[in-house]
Image (cartoon, rainbow, N blue to C red):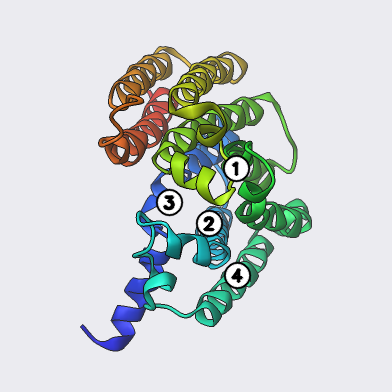
Amino acid sequence: MSIGLRRVRDYFELVRFSHTLFALPFAIMGAVLAAWGPNGLEGSPRAWLGILLCMATARSAAMAFNRLVDRDVDAKNPRTAGRHIPRGALTPSAVALFTLVCSAAFVASTLLFLPNPWPLRLSVPVLLWLLAYSYTKQFTSLAHFWLGVSLSLAPIAAWIALRADIAWPPVWLGLAVFWWVSGFDVIYSCQDADYDRSVGLRSVPARLGVAGALRLAALCHALMVVALVGLGVSYPLGAIYYIGVVAAALLLIYEHSLVRPDDLDRVNVAFFHVNVIISVGLLAVTMLDLFV
């Protein structure tokens, strides 16, 4: 592999580009609901391109900045010591430049929605919120919920980009994403509960213990299902969508069955595999419900 291709691969791995599948389906879902009209999907190709570019660039900027801010903490944690900056695959200055480029690209991508001015007006405040997440574990155990808000903005922003207004359906969808992300991030953070306590980082598992954190995550995911029902009622959506909600609820129950306070070996399966199925699956059943 050439040096150039290896460096591109390093950046893709740095920001876990494949994990875009977590939030992107919900952004597309919000856009589909916003763009659905009497004749099916509406909206210009330029606007749809803008949604994809904004999602990719904002997420890449936030992830790269997180790796930059956490580089010293990552280097001391055996679970994260192999990440790109601690092991020397990428330098802090290179990652900082990458963050700046992605941030500028995100703001520039909002120009695709003009003459709707709201995406451009909101781009910098949204970006600052996303980047600020990297500092939250230093002062609050609610960092997981800050991340939940960050990803919940995706479907709400997609609706605003296409309609230049706000309504209950994207709010309900944003709430579903908020509870979903907050819950699975609490589960994922259980792996570092002891380490977080030892270095003074704040998290729900460090504060409540793993057992308490898993109970809180279960509550979050129950509230996600409530929010999905709220979306179905407010839009409204039909039977196919509700079948998908039931399937998502069963998958969430399965996700929680994979992890126990005394056995976190399957956290990655719960975090990556099950959650991708949930997000992509909900997008699929929503579109099928609209088209049928």
Viewer-proximal residue, 190 or 186?
Answer: 190
Crowd around label 1: few <14 · some 14–19 · many ≥20 (10 Å): some
Crowd around label 4: few <14 · some 14–19 · many ≥20 (10 Å): some
Q: Which residue is mark 3?
A: 20
- Pick whichever of labels 4 and 3 is earlier in the sequence: 3
In the rendered view, tell whether residue 99 sits above or below residue 220. below
- Pick whichever of labels 2 and 1 is earlier in the sequence: 2
- 161 lies left or right of 287: right
- Pick whichever of labels 1 and 3 is earlier in the sequence: 3
Viewer-proximal residue, 289 or 102?
Answer: 102
Q: Are marks 2 and 3 in contact (CB under 8 Å)?
A: yes
Spatial CA distance of label 1 from label 3 is 26 Å
- Pick whichever of labels 4 and 2 is earlier in the sequence: 2
Q: Which residue is mark 1?
A: 202
Q: Label 1 amino acid?
A: Arg
In the rendered view, tell whether residue 38 sits above or below residue 46. above
Camera-side mark, 4 or 3: 3
Q: Which residue is mark 2?
A: 59
SS class, disc 3? helix
Spatial CA distance of label 4 from label 3 is 17 Å
Q: Label 4 amino acid?
A: Ala
Viewer-proximal residue, 180 or 280?
Answer: 180
